[in-house]
Amino acid sequence: MNEKELIPQLFKTEYRKIISVLCKLFGIVHIEIAEDITNDTFLLASETWGLKGIPENPTAWLYIVAKNKTKDYFKRHKTFSEKIVADFKYHQDQSVEIDVDLSIENITDSQLQMIFAICHPIIPLEAQIGLALRILCGFGIDEIAEAFLTNKETINKRLFRAKEKLRSENVKIEMPNTDDLHTRLEAVLSTLYLLFNEGYHSSSQNSHVRKELCLEAMRLTYFLIENKTTNTPIVNALMALMCFHSSRFDARNSQAGEPILYDDQDKNLWSTELIEKGNYFLIESAKGQKISKYHLEASIAYWHCTKIENAGKWENILQLYNQLLQIEYSPITALNRTYALSKVSGKEKAIREALKLGLSESHFYHSLMGNLYVDIDNKKATEHLEIALNLAKSHADKSTIKNISIR
Protein backbone atom coordinates (compact mmCIF):
# COMPACT_ATOMS: atom_id res chain seq x y z
CA MET A 1 0.00 0.00 0.00
CA ASN A 2 1.43 3.40 -0.97
CA GLU A 3 1.10 6.61 1.02
CA LYS A 4 -1.78 7.88 -1.15
CA GLU A 5 -3.86 4.89 -0.09
CA LEU A 6 -2.61 4.61 3.49
CA ILE A 7 -3.03 8.23 4.64
CA PRO A 8 -6.80 8.44 3.91
CA GLN A 9 -7.22 5.12 5.71
CA LEU A 10 -5.26 6.34 8.74
CA PHE A 11 -7.15 9.63 8.65
CA LYS A 12 -10.38 7.66 9.13
CA THR A 13 -9.03 5.67 12.09
CA GLU A 14 -6.53 7.99 13.80
CA TYR A 15 -7.82 11.53 13.22
CA ARG A 16 -10.63 11.10 15.74
CA LYS A 17 -8.25 9.65 18.34
CA ILE A 18 -5.69 12.42 18.11
CA ILE A 19 -8.20 15.27 17.98
CA SER A 20 -10.23 13.88 20.91
CA VAL A 21 -7.12 13.79 23.10
CA LEU A 22 -6.04 17.29 22.00
CA CYS A 23 -9.54 18.75 22.45
CA LYS A 24 -9.59 17.36 25.96
CA LEU A 25 -6.16 18.89 26.57
CA PHE A 26 -6.94 22.35 25.16
CA GLY A 27 -10.62 22.43 26.10
CA ILE A 28 -13.62 23.00 23.82
CA VAL A 29 -12.88 26.76 23.86
CA HIS A 30 -9.75 26.12 21.80
CA ILE A 31 -11.07 23.36 19.55
CA GLU A 32 -9.61 25.03 16.44
CA ILE A 33 -6.09 24.68 17.84
CA ALA A 34 -6.63 20.95 18.27
CA GLU A 35 -8.00 20.74 14.72
CA ASP A 36 -5.07 22.70 13.28
CA ILE A 37 -2.45 20.53 15.00
CA THR A 38 -4.19 17.33 13.93
CA ASN A 39 -4.58 18.50 10.34
CA ASP A 40 -0.95 19.65 10.23
CA THR A 41 0.12 16.22 11.46
CA PHE A 42 -1.55 14.49 8.53
CA LEU A 43 -0.33 17.14 6.09
CA LEU A 44 3.25 16.52 7.22
CA ALA A 45 2.72 12.78 6.82
CA SER A 46 1.54 13.30 3.26
CA GLU A 47 4.56 15.47 2.44
CA THR A 48 7.18 13.37 4.26
CA TRP A 49 6.05 9.87 3.38
CA GLY A 50 5.88 10.78 -0.29
CA LEU A 51 9.56 11.73 -0.21
CA LYS A 52 11.07 9.38 2.36
CA GLY A 53 8.68 6.46 2.25
CA ILE A 54 6.20 5.07 4.79
CA PRO A 55 7.69 4.64 8.30
CA GLU A 56 7.81 1.22 9.94
CA ASN A 57 4.97 2.15 12.33
CA PRO A 58 2.84 4.84 10.65
CA THR A 59 0.43 5.22 13.58
CA ALA A 60 3.23 5.71 16.10
CA TRP A 61 4.79 8.25 13.72
CA LEU A 62 1.54 10.25 13.67
CA TYR A 63 1.29 10.17 17.48
CA ILE A 64 4.89 11.35 17.94
CA VAL A 65 4.42 14.20 15.45
CA ALA A 66 1.12 15.25 17.10
CA LYS A 67 2.82 15.26 20.53
CA ASN A 68 5.77 17.30 19.27
CA LYS A 69 3.56 19.81 17.46
CA THR A 70 1.49 20.28 20.62
CA LYS A 71 4.59 20.84 22.76
CA ASP A 72 5.99 23.24 20.14
CA TYR A 73 2.72 25.16 20.23
CA PHE A 74 2.99 25.69 23.97
CA LYS A 75 6.61 26.78 23.66
CA ARG A 76 5.77 29.30 20.93
CA HIS A 77 2.74 30.69 22.73
CA LYS A 78 4.07 31.46 26.18
CA THR A 79 1.18 33.81 27.05
CA PHE A 80 -1.33 31.12 26.11
CA SER A 81 0.53 28.60 28.25
CA GLU A 82 0.59 30.89 31.28
CA LYS A 83 -3.17 31.55 31.05
CA ILE A 84 -4.37 28.12 30.05
CA VAL A 85 -2.03 25.47 31.38
CA ALA A 86 -2.87 26.30 34.98
CA ASP A 87 -6.50 25.40 34.27
CA PHE A 88 -5.70 21.88 33.14
CA LYS A 89 -6.93 19.74 35.98
CA TYR A 90 -4.02 17.36 35.68
CA HIS A 91 -1.36 20.04 35.15
CA GLN A 92 -1.64 22.40 38.09
CA ASP A 93 2.17 22.75 38.30
CA GLN A 94 3.23 24.96 35.38
CA SER A 95 6.82 23.83 35.78
CA VAL A 96 5.81 20.39 34.56
CA GLU A 97 6.07 19.94 30.81
CA ILE A 98 2.78 19.29 29.07
CA ASP A 99 2.26 15.56 28.49
CA VAL A 100 0.19 14.61 25.44
CA ASP A 101 -1.23 11.30 26.61
CA LEU A 102 -1.95 9.14 23.56
CA SER A 103 -2.24 5.92 25.51
CA ILE A 104 -5.02 3.53 24.51
CA GLU A 105 -6.84 4.21 27.79
CA ASN A 106 -6.77 8.01 27.40
CA ILE A 107 -7.71 7.81 23.72
CA THR A 108 -10.74 5.68 24.61
CA ASP A 109 -11.78 7.95 27.49
CA SER A 110 -11.28 11.11 25.42
CA GLN A 111 -13.39 9.82 22.53
CA LEU A 112 -16.22 8.83 24.86
CA GLN A 113 -16.13 12.23 26.55
CA MET A 114 -16.09 13.95 23.16
CA ILE A 115 -19.26 12.07 22.18
CA PHE A 116 -21.07 13.68 25.13
CA ALA A 117 -19.59 17.12 24.41
CA ILE A 118 -20.51 17.08 20.71
CA CYS A 119 -23.98 15.67 21.38
CA HIS A 120 -24.79 18.41 23.87
CA PRO A 121 -28.48 19.44 23.64
CA ILE A 122 -27.58 23.15 23.43
CA ILE A 123 -26.78 22.74 19.71
CA PRO A 124 -29.20 21.55 16.99
CA LEU A 125 -29.29 17.86 16.12
CA GLU A 126 -28.14 18.50 12.54
CA ALA A 127 -25.08 20.30 13.89
CA GLN A 128 -24.43 17.48 16.36
CA ILE A 129 -24.42 14.99 13.51
CA GLY A 130 -22.12 17.20 11.45
CA LEU A 131 -19.65 17.62 14.32
CA ALA A 132 -19.74 13.90 15.03
CA LEU A 133 -18.94 13.14 11.40
CA ARG A 134 -16.14 15.70 11.31
CA ILE A 135 -14.46 15.17 14.67
CA LEU A 136 -15.41 11.66 15.78
CA CYS A 137 -15.58 9.98 12.38
CA GLY A 138 -12.90 11.82 10.41
CA PHE A 139 -15.23 12.75 7.54
CA GLY A 140 -14.13 15.52 5.22
CA ILE A 141 -16.36 18.52 4.55
CA ASP A 142 -17.07 17.18 1.03
CA GLU A 143 -18.27 13.86 2.44
CA ILE A 144 -20.49 15.56 5.02
CA ALA A 145 -21.98 17.79 2.34
CA GLU A 146 -22.66 14.69 0.22
CA ALA A 147 -24.32 12.95 3.16
CA PHE A 148 -26.62 15.93 3.80
CA LEU A 149 -27.17 16.60 0.09
CA THR A 150 -25.98 20.18 0.50
CA ASN A 151 -22.89 22.28 -0.24
CA LYS A 152 -19.61 22.79 1.59
CA GLU A 153 -20.40 26.38 2.52
CA THR A 154 -23.58 25.35 4.34
CA ILE A 155 -21.73 22.62 6.26
CA ASN A 156 -18.87 24.95 7.21
CA LYS A 157 -21.33 27.56 8.53
CA ARG A 158 -23.26 24.91 10.46
CA LEU A 159 -20.11 23.55 12.09
CA PHE A 160 -18.82 27.04 12.88
CA ARG A 161 -22.05 28.02 14.65
CA ALA A 162 -22.05 24.78 16.61
CA LYS A 163 -18.46 25.28 17.79
CA GLU A 164 -19.22 28.86 18.76
CA LYS A 165 -22.15 27.69 20.86
CA LEU A 166 -20.08 25.03 22.59
CA ARG A 167 -17.39 27.63 23.20
CA SER A 168 -19.73 30.33 24.53
CA GLU A 169 -21.34 27.83 26.90
CA ASN A 170 -17.88 26.47 27.84
CA VAL A 171 -19.04 22.86 27.51
CA LYS A 172 -16.65 20.55 29.34
CA ILE A 173 -15.11 17.50 27.72
CA GLU A 174 -15.92 15.07 30.48
CA MET A 175 -18.42 12.42 31.44
CA PRO A 176 -21.71 13.80 32.82
CA ASN A 177 -22.26 13.36 36.54
CA THR A 178 -24.51 10.57 37.75
CA ASP A 179 -27.58 12.81 38.05
CA ASP A 180 -27.29 14.07 34.46
CA LEU A 181 -26.08 10.88 32.81
CA HIS A 182 -29.49 9.47 31.86
CA THR A 183 -30.71 12.67 30.19
CA ARG A 184 -27.41 13.30 28.43
CA LEU A 185 -27.20 9.69 27.28
CA GLU A 186 -30.64 9.95 25.69
CA ALA A 187 -29.43 13.03 23.78
CA VAL A 188 -26.38 11.10 22.55
CA LEU A 189 -28.56 8.17 21.44
CA SER A 190 -30.87 10.53 19.53
CA THR A 191 -27.88 11.86 17.60
CA LEU A 192 -26.49 8.39 16.86
CA TYR A 193 -29.95 7.20 15.81
CA LEU A 194 -30.29 10.10 13.38
CA LEU A 195 -26.74 9.59 12.13
CA PHE A 196 -27.56 5.96 11.35
CA ASN A 197 -30.80 6.96 9.64
CA GLU A 198 -28.92 9.52 7.52
CA GLY A 199 -27.06 6.56 6.07
CA TYR A 200 -29.79 3.95 5.98
CA HIS A 201 -32.54 6.14 4.57
CA SER A 202 -30.37 8.70 2.78
CA SER A 203 -31.39 9.97 -0.63
CA SER A 204 -27.72 10.18 -1.64
CA GLN A 205 -26.69 8.00 -4.56
CA ASN A 206 -23.23 7.51 -3.04
CA SER A 207 -23.59 4.03 -1.57
CA HIS A 208 -20.12 4.15 0.00
CA VAL A 209 -20.90 7.30 1.99
CA ARG A 210 -24.28 5.92 3.06
CA LYS A 211 -22.74 2.70 4.33
CA GLU A 212 -19.95 4.62 6.09
CA LEU A 213 -22.54 6.68 7.98
CA CYS A 214 -24.20 3.51 9.27
CA LEU A 215 -20.89 1.93 10.26
CA GLU A 216 -19.74 5.05 12.09
CA ALA A 217 -23.02 5.27 14.00
CA MET A 218 -22.58 1.65 15.02
CA ARG A 219 -18.95 2.21 16.04
CA LEU A 220 -19.87 5.15 18.27
CA THR A 221 -22.75 3.20 19.81
CA TYR A 222 -20.37 0.33 20.55
CA PHE A 223 -18.13 2.84 22.35
CA LEU A 224 -21.01 3.34 24.78
CA ILE A 225 -21.46 -0.41 25.20
CA GLU A 226 -17.77 -0.92 25.97
CA ASN A 227 -17.98 1.51 28.90
CA LYS A 228 -19.67 0.01 31.96
CA THR A 229 -21.21 3.37 32.91
CA THR A 230 -23.01 3.73 29.58
CA ASN A 231 -23.61 0.05 28.81
CA THR A 232 -27.33 0.25 29.54
CA PRO A 233 -30.33 -1.66 28.12
CA ILE A 234 -31.41 1.28 25.94
CA VAL A 235 -27.95 1.51 24.34
CA ASN A 236 -28.05 -2.22 23.58
CA ALA A 237 -31.50 -1.77 22.06
CA LEU A 238 -30.20 0.89 19.68
CA MET A 239 -27.25 -1.32 18.76
CA ALA A 240 -29.60 -4.23 18.06
CA LEU A 241 -31.71 -1.99 15.81
CA MET A 242 -28.62 -0.91 13.86
CA CYS A 243 -27.39 -4.50 13.46
CA PHE A 244 -30.73 -5.76 12.15
CA HIS A 245 -31.12 -2.91 9.68
CA SER A 246 -27.50 -3.18 8.51
CA SER A 247 -27.89 -6.90 7.93
CA ARG A 248 -30.13 -6.14 4.93
CA PHE A 249 -28.03 -3.29 3.56
CA ASP A 250 -26.57 -5.22 0.60
CA ALA A 251 -29.98 -6.56 -0.41
CA ARG A 252 -31.69 -3.17 -0.54
CA ASN A 253 -30.14 -2.08 -3.83
CA SER A 254 -29.44 -3.71 -7.17
CA GLN A 255 -25.98 -3.76 -8.75
CA ALA A 256 -27.06 -0.70 -10.70
CA GLY A 257 -27.87 1.06 -7.42
CA GLU A 258 -31.65 0.87 -7.83
CA PRO A 259 -33.66 0.30 -4.61
CA ILE A 260 -35.25 -3.13 -4.11
CA LEU A 261 -38.54 -3.40 -2.20
CA TYR A 262 -38.58 -5.56 0.94
CA ASP A 263 -40.70 -8.33 -0.57
CA ASP A 264 -38.36 -8.59 -3.56
CA GLN A 265 -35.05 -8.68 -1.66
CA ASP A 266 -32.72 -11.66 -2.02
CA LYS A 267 -32.69 -12.99 1.53
CA ASN A 268 -29.45 -14.86 0.83
CA LEU A 269 -27.75 -11.45 0.79
CA TRP A 270 -28.82 -10.71 4.35
CA SER A 271 -25.87 -10.85 6.75
CA THR A 272 -26.29 -13.77 9.16
CA GLU A 273 -23.45 -12.42 11.31
CA LEU A 274 -25.16 -9.06 11.83
CA ILE A 275 -28.50 -10.73 12.52
CA GLU A 276 -26.85 -12.87 15.20
CA LYS A 277 -25.21 -9.80 16.72
CA GLY A 278 -28.58 -8.05 16.65
CA ASN A 279 -30.10 -10.99 18.53
CA TYR A 280 -27.35 -10.77 21.17
CA PHE A 281 -27.82 -7.05 21.78
CA LEU A 282 -31.62 -7.42 21.78
CA ILE A 283 -31.35 -10.00 24.56
CA GLU A 284 -28.99 -7.68 26.47
CA SER A 285 -31.49 -4.83 26.06
CA ALA A 286 -34.16 -6.88 27.82
CA LYS A 287 -32.29 -6.76 31.15
CA GLY A 288 -33.83 -3.43 32.12
CA GLN A 289 -37.29 -2.48 33.33
CA LYS A 290 -38.10 0.24 30.78
CA ILE A 291 -39.15 -0.25 27.16
CA SER A 292 -37.96 2.52 24.84
CA LYS A 293 -38.73 3.27 21.20
CA TYR A 294 -35.37 1.66 20.38
CA HIS A 295 -36.51 -1.61 22.00
CA LEU A 296 -39.69 -1.62 19.92
CA GLU A 297 -37.99 -0.61 16.65
CA ALA A 298 -35.30 -3.23 17.23
CA SER A 299 -37.98 -5.87 17.79
CA ILE A 300 -39.74 -4.80 14.57
CA ALA A 301 -36.42 -5.00 12.73
CA TYR A 302 -35.85 -8.47 14.24
CA TRP A 303 -39.11 -9.73 12.74
CA HIS A 304 -38.23 -8.17 9.39
CA CYS A 305 -35.01 -10.22 9.47
CA THR A 306 -36.85 -13.50 9.87
CA LYS A 307 -36.95 -15.22 6.49
CA ILE A 308 -40.12 -17.24 7.10
CA GLU A 309 -43.28 -15.43 5.99
CA ASN A 310 -46.42 -16.21 8.03
CA ALA A 311 -49.32 -14.47 9.73
CA GLY A 312 -47.62 -14.67 13.12
CA LYS A 313 -44.67 -12.63 11.88
CA TRP A 314 -46.81 -9.73 10.71
CA GLU A 315 -49.13 -9.95 13.71
CA ASN A 316 -46.10 -9.42 15.97
CA ILE A 317 -44.90 -6.52 13.83
CA LEU A 318 -48.37 -4.93 13.94
CA GLN A 319 -48.59 -5.17 17.72
CA LEU A 320 -45.12 -3.67 18.09
CA TYR A 321 -46.14 -0.75 15.86
CA ASN A 322 -49.21 -0.24 18.04
CA GLN A 323 -46.95 0.04 21.11
CA LEU A 324 -44.50 2.30 19.30
CA LEU A 325 -47.24 4.74 18.29
CA GLN A 326 -48.33 4.96 21.92
CA ILE A 327 -44.81 5.88 23.01
CA GLU A 328 -44.01 8.28 20.17
CA TYR A 329 -46.37 9.10 17.31
CA SER A 330 -44.95 9.85 13.89
CA PRO A 331 -46.63 9.85 10.45
CA ILE A 332 -44.02 7.46 9.01
CA THR A 333 -44.56 5.01 11.87
CA ALA A 334 -48.32 5.20 11.25
CA LEU A 335 -47.79 4.47 7.54
CA ASN A 336 -45.50 1.55 8.32
CA ARG A 337 -48.12 0.19 10.71
CA THR A 338 -50.68 0.39 7.91
CA TYR A 339 -48.50 -1.80 5.69
CA ALA A 340 -48.22 -4.36 8.51
CA LEU A 341 -52.01 -4.15 8.94
CA SER A 342 -52.46 -5.04 5.26
CA LYS A 343 -50.42 -8.20 5.83
CA VAL A 344 -52.56 -9.21 8.81
CA SER A 345 -56.07 -8.01 7.96
CA GLY A 346 -55.98 -7.44 4.22
CA LYS A 347 -55.57 -4.45 1.93
CA GLU A 348 -59.12 -3.13 2.19
CA LYS A 349 -58.85 -2.57 5.95
CA ALA A 350 -55.40 -1.05 5.53
CA ILE A 351 -56.73 1.39 2.92
CA ARG A 352 -59.49 2.53 5.27
CA GLU A 353 -56.92 3.13 8.02
CA ALA A 354 -54.55 4.95 5.66
CA LEU A 355 -57.29 7.34 4.55
CA LYS A 356 -57.67 8.50 8.16
CA LEU A 357 -54.02 9.63 8.40
CA GLY A 358 -54.42 12.84 6.38
CA LEU A 359 -51.03 12.57 4.71
CA SER A 360 -52.02 13.43 1.15
CA GLU A 361 -49.00 15.74 0.75
CA SER A 362 -46.55 12.91 1.38
CA HIS A 363 -45.12 10.79 -1.44
CA PHE A 364 -44.70 7.94 1.07
CA TYR A 365 -48.46 7.97 1.63
CA HIS A 366 -49.26 7.83 -2.08
CA SER A 367 -46.63 5.12 -2.63
CA LEU A 368 -48.29 3.01 0.05
CA MET A 369 -51.78 3.68 -1.32
CA GLY A 370 -50.60 2.77 -4.81
CA ASN A 371 -49.22 -0.47 -3.45
CA LEU A 372 -52.39 -1.27 -1.52
CA TYR A 373 -54.72 -0.58 -4.45
CA VAL A 374 -52.85 -2.94 -6.78
CA ASP A 375 -55.27 -5.73 -7.86
CA ILE A 376 -58.13 -4.00 -6.00
CA ASP A 377 -58.47 -0.90 -8.16
CA ASN A 378 -55.55 -0.60 -10.57
CA LYS A 379 -56.79 2.76 -11.85
CA LYS A 380 -56.56 4.24 -8.35
CA ALA A 381 -53.22 2.50 -7.87
CA THR A 382 -51.87 4.24 -10.98
CA GLU A 383 -53.25 7.61 -9.87
CA HIS A 384 -51.60 7.38 -6.45
CA LEU A 385 -48.27 6.27 -7.92
CA GLU A 386 -48.30 9.17 -10.38
CA ILE A 387 -48.94 11.61 -7.53
CA ALA A 388 -46.15 9.96 -5.55
CA LEU A 389 -43.75 10.38 -8.47
CA ASN A 390 -44.59 14.07 -8.74
CA LEU A 391 -44.11 14.63 -5.00
CA ALA A 392 -40.89 12.60 -4.65
CA LYS A 393 -37.72 14.66 -4.90
CA SER A 394 -34.88 12.15 -4.89
CA HIS A 395 -33.89 9.69 -7.58
CA ALA A 396 -33.96 6.85 -5.04
CA ASP A 397 -37.54 7.57 -3.98
CA LYS A 398 -38.69 7.85 -7.60
CA SER A 399 -37.01 4.53 -8.43
CA THR A 400 -38.73 2.86 -5.49
CA ILE A 401 -42.12 4.08 -6.69
CA LYS A 402 -41.45 2.89 -10.24
CA ASN A 403 -40.64 -0.57 -8.90
CA ILE A 404 -44.23 -1.01 -7.65
CA SER A 405 -45.70 -3.11 -10.41
CA ILE A 406 -49.33 -3.03 -11.51
CA ARG A 407 -50.30 -6.23 -13.26
Image (cartoon, rainbow, N blue to C red):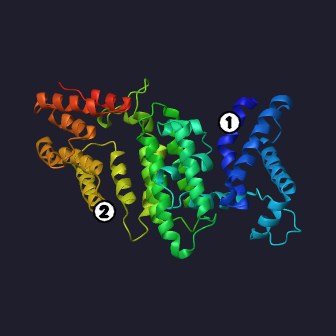
Label tally: 2
Answer above or below: position of 182 versus 363. below
Which quarter shows the C terminus? top left
- Residue 327's tag is 2
Residue beneath disc 1: 8
Q: Residue at x 73, y 59 (%)?
A: 26
What amino acid does circle 1 point to?
Answer: Pro
Q: Residue at x 45, y 50 (%)?
A: 194
What amino acid does circle 2 point to?
Answer: Ile
Residue 1 is at least partly visible in this image: no
Which quarter shows the N terminus? top right
Q: Quadrant of residue 384?
A: top left
Q: Residues within 10 Å of mark 2 (few under 14, many from 20)?
A: few
Q: Position of residue 226 (x, y in %)?
A: 59, 60
Q: Position of residue 234 (x, y in %)?
A: 44, 63
Q: Nearer the viewer, residue 123 or 44?
A: 123
| Left or right of 249 in this view: 382 | left
Answer above or below: position of 20 versus 88. above
Q: Position of residue 251 (x, y in %)?
A: 41, 34
